[in-house]
Amino acid sequence: MKKWYLFFFILASAGRLLANSILIPMDDKQSNHLKAYGVAYWELKADQELDWLLNYRGGSFLMKYSTALEKECRLRDVSFDVISDATTNSILKYVTNPDVNMDAVKLHKAAKIVVYSPIKVSSASFEDTDAVLLVLKYAEIPFEIVYDEEIMKGDLSKYDWLHLHHEDFTGQFGRNRRRMSIADIQAQENIAKKFGYKKVSQLKLDVARTIKGFCAGGGYLFAMCSGAESLDVALAAEGVDIVPSVFDGDGVDPNAQSKLDFSKTLAFEDFKLELSGDDDYRGGGMSFSTINSSSGQGWGEETNSYFSLFDFSAKWDVIPAMLVQNHEALIREFMGQTTAFNKKTVKSSVLVMGQSKASDRYIYGELGRGQFTFYGGHDPEGQRGFHRMPTDLNLHPHSPGYRLILNNVLFPSAKKKKRKT
């Protein structure tokens, strides 16, 4: 009997010695889609290159075999196949065939990830539901936290990839204050005072301009929900008072709308500000502008509607093809303070990657040497935004909505090619 055990042990060991690669499939055969991204990042962090097989089995990952990598997949419950050199070459030959809409994109060094969030300075319990924080932790992808003070000190230069939490860059504390506690507001006022600003809105404007500069200089910017909308509203309103007295002690410029400069924004133009009296801001005032497709409509009813991802050429439109990799092309819509983007306000220079019949949900743009992606809504597995407990991603390991976030995390590791169309 011992001889048989020895024989099978030698046979298994020989198989591993002949193994060339590990294939992590990202189709319906994958046991945990979200943690698979964590394995890919782990491999990049170890200074190992890998191939992202665009449109092949849901956007699979192909990596050089090692016992450490095999162990990591098992520890994270990520499905994988150990394949031979011949099988590896066959797959690469197939995906690079000009007759199929697939390709292999080489991923290199892991991007250094940072999240802009008030949890750096206050309890900010609302941030427990931030989708990016949730999925980075779940996928075990390391990141750091910065807020206004670090940005004003120039710390963004240390990072490659920046996520904006569901921030209010206009200095209106989320407008109706439901999102922020007194402690959260006081923390922002203290930072403004420290840097010599009379108003939080003035601090936030300079923070927004610095973030724009980070992107233009070659950084990658990812924002969801109100972070995307309020960033562009603040940039367009530079030098214009759009903050009501309930927040800063003086009134709104009556000519604010006509003074907006849309040339300063990243993604949006021709939007109308949501400006009203102080009483409205205390009880409502959820939207910042008509960028928000649900502006003026309140929360509405929960629905089971979906938005669709566009199908891009993996060989010619490599960047958007990477950003839409998924095992599902239809994604359930979800709400937020900024639920989705009004199609009439999205600049023609911006590429729409996902949309519903009524709105744009997922968009990409380029600024200087950098790129940005804006994603509408608060939580891909939630409906009504932030009136809920944090999502337990153990219950949603295959979430296609969360996969879009992680596509963006891996994106800076690729050798990017400019779009041809």
Image (cartoon, rainbow, N blue to C red):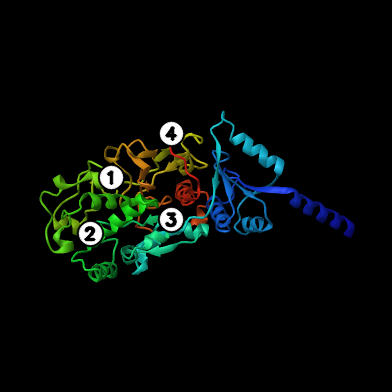
Residue identified by numbered label 3: 160
x then y, percent, for residue 45: 55, 58
Classify residue 311 as left or right of residue 246: right
Identify the residue at the far top of this view: 99
For marks 2 and 4, the one nearer the N-term is 2
Amino acid residing under circle 2: Gln
- Quadrant of the rendered image containing residue 27: top right
Q: Residues within 10 Å of mark 2 (few under 14, many from 20)?
A: many
- Res 355 visible: no
**Does residue 405 sit above or below 346 in this rendering?**
below
Choose between 353 and 21: the one closer to the eye.
21
CA gap between label 2 and label 3 equals 29 Å
Q: Nearer the viewer, mark 4 or mark 1?
A: 4
**In the rendered structure, which amino acid carries the disc numbered 1?**
Ser
Residue that numbered label 1 is attached to: 294
Going from N to C along the chain, the mark reached first, 3 or 1, is 3
Residue at which label 4 appears: 420
Confirm or deny contact between disc 2 and disc 4 (CB under 8 A). Answer: no
Task: Point out residue 97 in the picture as x, y percentages from the top left corner.
Answer: 59, 32
Q: CA distance from mark 2 to mark 4?
A: 41 Å
Marks 1 and 2: which is nearer the front?
A: 2
Which residue appears farthest toward the left when viewing the image?
254
What secondary structure is found at the residue carrying circle 1?
loop
Helix, strand or loop at label 2? It is: loop
Q: Which residue is mark 2?
A: 172
Give the amino acid at mark 3: Asp
SS at badge 3? loop
Estimate the spatial distance between the alpha carbons at disc 1 and disc 2, rounded to whole Å: 19 Å
**Camera-nearest label, 2 or 3:** 3
